[in-house]
Amino acid sequence: MDSPQNCRHCDRNLCIHRVPLFSSLSEENLLQIAGLIQHKSFEKGELLISEGGSMESLIIIHQGRVKAFRYTSAGREQILYLFSEGDFFGEQYLFSNLRATYNVEALSPVKICLLTKSQLHKVLLTHPDVAIKLISELGKRIAQMENAFQSMGIRDVDARVATLLLDFAEKFGVDAPGGPLITLPISREGMANYLGIARETLSRKLSKFEDDGLIQSVDLKTIQVRDRDSLGDLAGLE
Amino acid sequence: MDSPQNCRHCDRNLCIHRVPLFSSLSEENLLQIAGLIQHKSFEKGELLISEGGSMESLIIIHQGRVKAFRYTSAGREQILYLFSEGDFFGEQYLFSNLRATYNVEALSPVKICLLTKSQLHKVLLTHPDVAIKLISELGKRIAQMENAFQSMGIRDVDARVATLLLDFAEKFGVDAPGGPLITLPISREGMANYLGIARETLSRKLSKFEDDGLIQSVDLKTIQVRDRDSLGDLAGLE
DNA sequence: CGTGTACTTGAGAATTGTCAAAGGCTGTGG
DNA sequence: CCACAGCCTTTGACAATTCTCAAGTACACG
């Protein structure tokens, strides 16, 4: 049906259509902006951004998953965010010349859309409603970060692991008979680092959860949530 | 010298002058906005905001200190932020009707300045540069939160305590012969909760740090940093 | 089919949490 | 001005958890 040209066109719009950031714009303006957007692809394992590098663009994930992380002084990798389709990042550097404070690595083949700082500046100045939307999105990001921060403050490790599983189920879960299937975006080591525990401890917790019937390990990269309520109890939700 | 009226005028300007948010505005515009601002005072221990309450204004701390916190399911108080003069909060609710996700309590007598949502909306729509400044400030807040998140992810408790002491030294420290004096804004219990450790553990760490000559406990609410470098080493700074 | 990587499991060491008691500071009332 | 009550903090001892190191297992990939 679609000609290749149409398809590429489609493709371009997708980025911008998916991002709530631009939802207030008219179709006309959207097309204008879409024209400014650059596209890039990365292979799994490639670095999109490295710590200390300059950040010249807002980056929107069009396809695939990435992790944003830093190295701790102990040499451990501390994951800050997992971004997937529709997420954007780099916004904190839009109005500063600060260097990137984290690395971003592709966890799968990734396609991104780029909007340079100066282009976005123009958009923001001429479309105050986009600025307001951006503020609102940043507010959400902050709220999300506050939640993550709080769950890190929980002393009980079981609760932290349960919280992570539920977060993953929400973000990466696919409904299936028996419970949502989570395709884990990161290794056990990554998860352990994210939680600030040893990878062995995570293994043990997952084994225990499986023994207790809370989850089912399908294969190394797939976990099925079998008892969401009990996980929620552990996580400390009321 | 100043008449009472003048003084009050001064007082009004202070809020707005202190906040980088409005730094791009002309004196004229500043005065305009200053006129819109409401003022309130709170006693130590009073709640400025309670979880689940509605948020109708951006709040700027004019004088004093406050803590923003939630209760964990275990009933513990998890402190998310400590705000002092010039800090503002409530920005994440500006463009949503979400309820407050944390409590804010005065840690000392506090004076605040309020700018309602609708007033700020107008300012943002008519002054895109303020919107940009706000975006930039939110970016800083996010970066700060990322740092806090990372330090929570550090497994080593000594490092977390050292990080907290250094943060406090920077934010609340006053230079003095022998090293910066920190007036602690919160109790040991508060600090322990912030770090996600038991208060007894914090006590022991502080005692150990004192034995090692890293800090000196002046009185319960005052700590002197005597060996910043060693604290930095512990905190894992390079 | 072998090799390497990632994961799991085990056991002992180290750290932290919990419970209990003692110490110290603050503010009130005599 | 002192005594006492109440609260927060410190310290001690033990229990529980987690970390570390090490061996063994599963899986993916060439």
Image (cartoon, coloured by chain):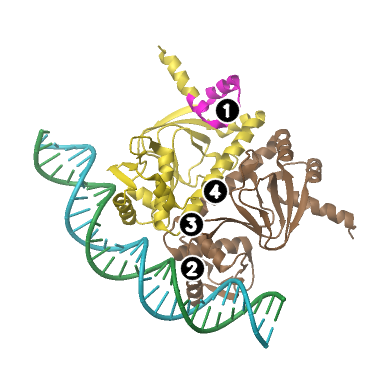
Chain colours: A brown, B yellow, C cyan, D green
Between disc 1 and disc 4, the foreground one is 1
Structural crowding at the residue carrying mark 3, measured as other residues with C-alpha within 10 Å and reported as few (<14), some (14–19) or many (≥20):
many
Residue B226 seen in this snapshot: yes
| Circles 2 and 4 on the same chain | yes
Please rate how many residues cluster around mark 4, counting C-alpha atoms within 10 Å: few if below 14, some from 14 to 19, many from 20: some
- Give the percent coordinates (x, y) of residue A47: 67, 57
Q: Which residue is mark 3?
A: B153
Label 4, secondary structure: give it: helix
Whether residue A196 is in magenta: the answer is no
Secondary structure beneath label 3? helix
Type of residue at label 3? Gly
For this view, does B141 lie left or right of residue A32? left
By secondary structure, the bulk of the magenta-drawn segment is best described as helix
- Labels 2 and 3 within one chain: no
- Is B212 on the left-hand or right-hand side of A124? left
| Residue tagged 1 | B23
Marked residue chain, label 1: B
Please state, as top left, top right, bottom left or bottom right, where the N terminus of chain B lies in the image: top left
Label 4: which residue?
Answer: A143
Q: Is residue B140 above or below residue A110?
A: above
Of labels 3 and 1, earlier in sequence is: 1
Q: Earlier in the sequence, mark 2 or mark 4?
A: 4
Viewer-nearest of labels 1 and 2? 1
Magenta region, residue range: B14-36
Residue beneath disc 2: A230
Residue count near mark 2 (Cα–Cα under 10 Å), binned few <14, some 14–19, many ≥20 = some
Disc ID at residue B51: none
Q: Is disc 4 on the same chain as disc 3?
A: no
Q: Nearer the viewer, mark 2 or mark 4?
A: 4
